[in-house]
Amino acid sequence: MAALAELLGNNLLGQGASKVSTAEALAGKGAVALYFSAHWCPPCRGFTPQLAEWYKKDLRGKGLEIVFVSSDEDEASFTEYFEEQPWLALPFEERETKEKLSKEFKVRGIPSLVILDSEGKLITKDGQAAISGDPEGAEFPWKPVPVKQLLEKANFINSSGEVTLKDVIENKKAIALYFSAHWCPPCRGFTPQLADWYKNDLQGKGLEVIFVSSDRDEAAFKEYFAEQPWLALDYSDRALKGKLSNAFGVRGIPSLVILDSDLNTITTDGRSAISADPTGLELPWFPKPVKNLNQGPGDIQEVPTLMVFCETNDASEQKRVEETLSPIAKRFMDKQKETEDDLELSFVIVTEGAGLAPRIRGMLNLPTLPLQPHEHPMEKKEAGAGWGCDGCQQSGAGKERYRCANGCDFDFCGECYAKAMSGGEPVKMSARMAIVDIPSDGAYYLAEEGLSITSASVEEFVASFQAGTLERKQLS
């Protein structure tokens, strides 16, 4: 309990708002759930009575203790809300401890349940999903099961019947778990693309895809799976589907998780990886030390990220910048593997002036660039539904649609396509380096304008960030 007492402080609030010793209150507990919540939050107000019922009926008896960590705006609201709760609470005045806990466990929204073992070690950050899926505590304390063990229990099917896990992985370089559903418009748009890529190149190069359905009934699953040329997790195994979603933190669909042939995770952002390489030249798509923003934001929400904006530089200069960053970024990745801690710093290069780049430039108060052509040819497509323009960031509903002819998940509306292709003298700007630290309440740091991107300048910028000597700015 010493580690938990150090984490939470010496005293907690018990029922009646009386202070109790943290060590004594948590002694003998099999697990402790930190419940980040607030009186003003409608989802919290909906979830708290459910959690309280589960806690009183089963979970308390199984050895779970819950500690309310308040995001309320004042002590009166905290007190009123805590009176409805049958567990412990961090005292409201411990705002510094609350902020430390939120940062430690990367709490981005509420309600959120973080489950720790009796030694204060993390079991899962997604305790809400774990407990909601097992409110009686049959699998208490909800320690994550290795993915390989989950899949060994799975039933897979194809158009002909059941398939064993041995058959699935035999002679395969990678396995893609495809979380998707018939009712989801983006899924309905992406599935035909993925099927074409799979049949034309990826299957032959050693990729197997397994459809993990989020459909609402088996009839919808069967209709949707009939359009797909790969395998599926048997629809009847809903519990396993939920465990797989939780294991990979799947929060939206379509989502692709890539595993190697030993069923170790390669990337949870397989959709970006395959969209950028639909012929499988880089299969199985091991994460590169330096990500490109045109393939998605990566883990910028969770990890401080060094970004180099070089949209107006030519391809050779962009390649040089990436090669400069790569060994430094790899050092951080290697350290993460050795320590099994969170990644300390992620690295991203920005080579296109469309997509997310204009939005992030605006957040960093950097100069806005005119729209640039996409790196690949684009062709006019039927508009369809559920798409958005990567230029103006608006919905594509009712607009002309131009899509990357090479298969990237990239679209322009007619107006943005015309602007990007209008020609004229291209804008030239020197590369600019920044560190975006969203986990630290939306902080960011800018390197000196005009600073050349060299190994020495990057190392110095990183060292200054780690030492806390850079000027902190606030994301707008």
Image: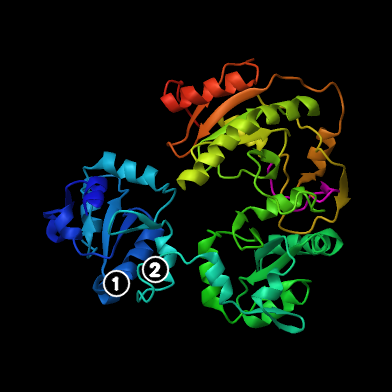
Check whether the beta carbons of the residues at disc 1 and disc 2 lie within 8 A of each other: yes
Q: Kindly indicate the quadrant of the structure image that contains residue 255.
A: bottom right
Asked if residue 186 lies left or right of residue 18, the reply is right
Point out residue 367 in the picture as x, y percentages from the top left corner.
Answer: 65, 23
**How was the colour assigned to the protein in this rendering?**
rainbow
| Residue 133, percent from left and from top | 44, 72
Say if the magenta span includes residue 319. Answer: no
Query: Up-down: is 158 above or below 354?
Result: below
- The kind of residue tagged 2 is Ile
**Magenta segment, prevailing SS (helix, strand or loop):** loop
For the point 84% across and 48% down, the residue is: 406
Q: Does 44 sit above or below residue 75?
A: below
Is 455 on the left-hand or right-hand side of 117? right
Residue 365 seen in the figure: no
Residue 420 visible in this rendered orientation of the protein? yes
Q: Which mark is residue 195?
A: none
Q: Amino acid at mark 1?
A: Leu
Count every numbered label the image shows and give the total.
Answer: 2
Residue 59, numbered label: 1
Circle 2 packing at 10 Å, graded few (<14), some (14-19), many (20+), is many
| Residue at (68, 63) in percent of width and height | 175
Q: Secondary structure at mark 2?
A: helix
**Direction from residue 61 to residue 301 in the image, left or right:** right
The x and y percentages for residue 187 are 70, 63
Q: What segment carries the magenta color?
A: 393-407
Label 2: which residue? Answer: 131
Q: Nearer the viewer, residue 413 or 248?
A: 248
Q: Nearer the viewer, residue 177 or 193?
A: 177
Give the secondary structure at mark 1.
Answer: helix
The residue located at (64%, 15%) in the rendering is: 450
Mark 1 / mark 2, whichever is N-terminal: 1
300 or 139: nearer the eye?
139
